Each structure stands twice: as structure tokens, then as C-alpha cells.
Amino acid sequence: MKKFIFVLLALVVLAVSVPVFAEGELIGVAMPTNSLQRWNQDGNNMKTQLEKAGYKVILEFANNDVALQISQLENMILNDVKLLVVASIDGGALGDVLKTAKDNGIPVIAYDRLITGTEYVDYYTSFDNYRVGKFQGDYIVKALDLENAAGPFNIEFFGGSPDDNNAHLFYQGAIDVLQPYLDSGKLVCPSGQIDFNTVAILGWGTDDAQARMDNLINSYYADGKTKLDVVLSPNDSLALGIANSLKAAGFTLDNWPIITGQDCDIPNTINLIQGYQAMSVFKDTRTLAERTVKMASQILNGEEVEVNNTTDYDNGVKIVPSYLCDPVVVDKSNYKEMLIDSGYYTEDQIAVK
């Protein structure tokens, strides 16, 4: 009898300690575009992992059209989603539609891009984006041996889309590393274009980055005497445009500059293998999706939501509690380990053809 009571109590304790899982709930996932490999992977990883966890998913891509993304979010609310995961196009443009979500009791997770200027965002999941920029700056310092080399070395700067909060963090992280070398004269920017608003590329467009690089080459490097040593690119879509411009201008591996990047997109990884891009910061979207799914489950089950940053992500109205994943530097020395051995890509996907 005592044994029976003990087992019964154990089962009761177990039942109380295991949360009721909100299976079958509908979750809306809003991605900015499917024209970039990175966002395709993010959206599909999110959908796969949410469905694996038992949720139903509405996944939408907005073709970098803010009005379309707002319309998609409105439709998700009308379809009675229980939670929204939003990778915004313009982080400051969603206040009204997110107020509607709040009025309908729908919590909001900002995914990778911080939603700004509104109180109606509950949590934020991303990578440590300041650290991404710092990694890029540190790579340049090491590659040029700026601590010991006499210099000067010529550098040009590119920034991401000014409506993307992350773009500012990437750039600040890199500039904080490189500014002392600019101040000492070891790094020189022949164009003089260093201010973020001057070097930013709206919408992260590859073609726009290529056009700006064309102008820089024609204006400052066409004499054949001025060497371009490094180009700070915050991500791979811009790095691809920069590399295309350099190739069109006749640059070869003999005089190729260091180019940084982020995301380890397939064309850029191939460029990295061939020597046309020095590095890329790898942000494993599987990890971010996994963390976001866990956060969504905790919210919907009424559990304590795990975060690791409650101080840094001020959206202009509130500090948004956040979970930041760790990025990793990838270059020619470790791309196989980080991208192939981890199962992120197959060898065929990044084979040089």
C-alpha cells in the first residue's frame, strides 16, 4: 500500500512539473524577403522547427516591401495567430499593426532585427551584432598586422541598410576596433567616406554595392598607383557586389583587397574558397531558429522566458529583453569544419565550378 501511494505521488509530482505544451497553436512568421539566401533559410528553418514542435505556421516573405509586410501581419492577426515572429524590413514602421496585435493578446518576438519606436514588442532573438562588427574589425587588424606593420594601408567602408538596427551595430563594432588605426594614420581612407550615413547601402542591395564600388574605383584607384588593401563589408550581399565590381575593373588575386562579410552565403563561401573574400561571420540560422522556437514555447506555455541580455537593446521606447546567440568567424582555414562538417552545406553546394 505504501509503495502504491509513493508511486501515485511521484506521478502527481511529475504531472505538475511538466508544462502543458501548447501544441497546435498557430504562429505567424514574417520574413523581409525571399530574394536573399539568408532569409530563405531563416524562414524555412523557423517553419520546420515550429512544426516539429507541434505548432501550425503561417510563413510570409514581403519582398522588402514595408506596406506588404504590414498587410501580411494584419492578415495573420485576422487568422487568429497566437504569437508573431517578425523579422522587420523597417524596424520603425510596425508600431500600429503591432498595437493591433497587442490589443488581440498576441505576443511579438522580434527576430534578428530589433523592432524600434514601439512598446508592442515583447522579446528579441538575434546574434550579438555588435560583436559581428568587432569580429570583422579584429580580422582586418590581424590580417594586416596593424599592431606591427608600418602601413599606411588603404581602406574603404561599406555600411548596411540604415533602416536596419543591426546595420548600425555591425558598423559601430567594426569602427570601435579600427578607429585607433585611422587616428594613427596606419589606416587611410582615400575617399574620406567613413560616416555611416555616407557609406550605408539601403536595402542591402548587391547591385547598389557594386555601383558604389565602381564609383570608388573610378574616383580613387583608377591611376594604377593607389593600392586598395581592404574593404570593410558588413555582410555577404554587399561583399558580393564589391567583388563583382573589382573583377569587372580588372583586379586579380595578385592585387585583391581583403573583403569582410557576414552570413556565409553560398556564392560568398565559393569566393572565400577561391580567395575573393577573406572572411565571413557565420550566424547559424538553425541555432537562432531553435532559440526562437524555445522562446515561443515558453511564452505560449506561460513559463519564464529565458533571456541573456536585459540592458542593451533599447528600441527608443523600452529595453527589449533579448536572447543573443554567438556568431563565429569563418575563413579558408575552417570553412569545412563550420559549414560542411556541421551539416549546414554539402560539399556539392559550395563546390567551385
Image: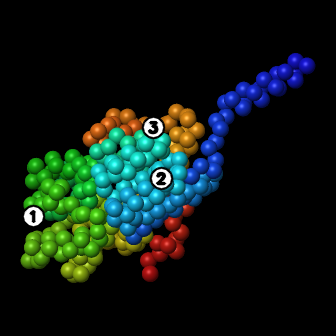
- Residues at discs 2 and 1 in contact (Cβ within 8 Å): no
Amino acid under label 1?
Pro
In the image, taking residue 15 as reference, residue 235 lies left or right, namely left
Mark drawn on residue 232 = none
- Residues at discs 1 and 3 in contact (Cβ within 8 Å): no
- Residues at discs 3 and 2 in contact (Cβ within 8 Å): no
How far apart, in angstroms, are the residues tagged by discs 2 and 1?
Answer: 51 Å
Amino acid under label 3?
Val
Q: Position of residue 215 (x, y in %)?
A: 14, 73
- The figure's colour scheme reads rainbow
Q: Position of residue 4 (x, y in %)?
A: 87, 23
Label 3 sits on residue = 307
Mark 3 neighbour density, 10 Å: few (under 14) some (14–19) many (20 or more): some
Of helix, strand and loop, which one carries label 2? helix
The residue that appears at 38% across and 42% down in the rendered structure is: 120
How far apart, in angstroms, are the residues tagged by discs 3 and 2?
Answer: 26 Å
In the image, taking residue 285 as reference, residue 314 lies left or right, namely left
Determine which quarter of the picture holds residue 297.
Answer: top right
Q: Position of residue 95 (x, y in %)?
A: 33, 48
Q: Is residue 150 visible?
A: no
Q: Quadrant of the N terminus?
A: top right
Mark 2 neighbour density, 10 Å: few (under 14) some (14–19) many (20 or more): many
22 or 204, which lies in front?
A: 22
93 or 53, which lies in front?
A: 93
Label 1 sits on residue = 190
Amino acid under label 2?
Ile
Mark drawn on residue 77 = 2
How far apart, in angstroms, are the residues tagged by discs 1 and 3?
Answer: 43 Å
Closer to the chain start, of discs 3 and 2, is: 2
288 or 25, which lies in front?
A: 25
**Does 208 appear above or below 302?**
below
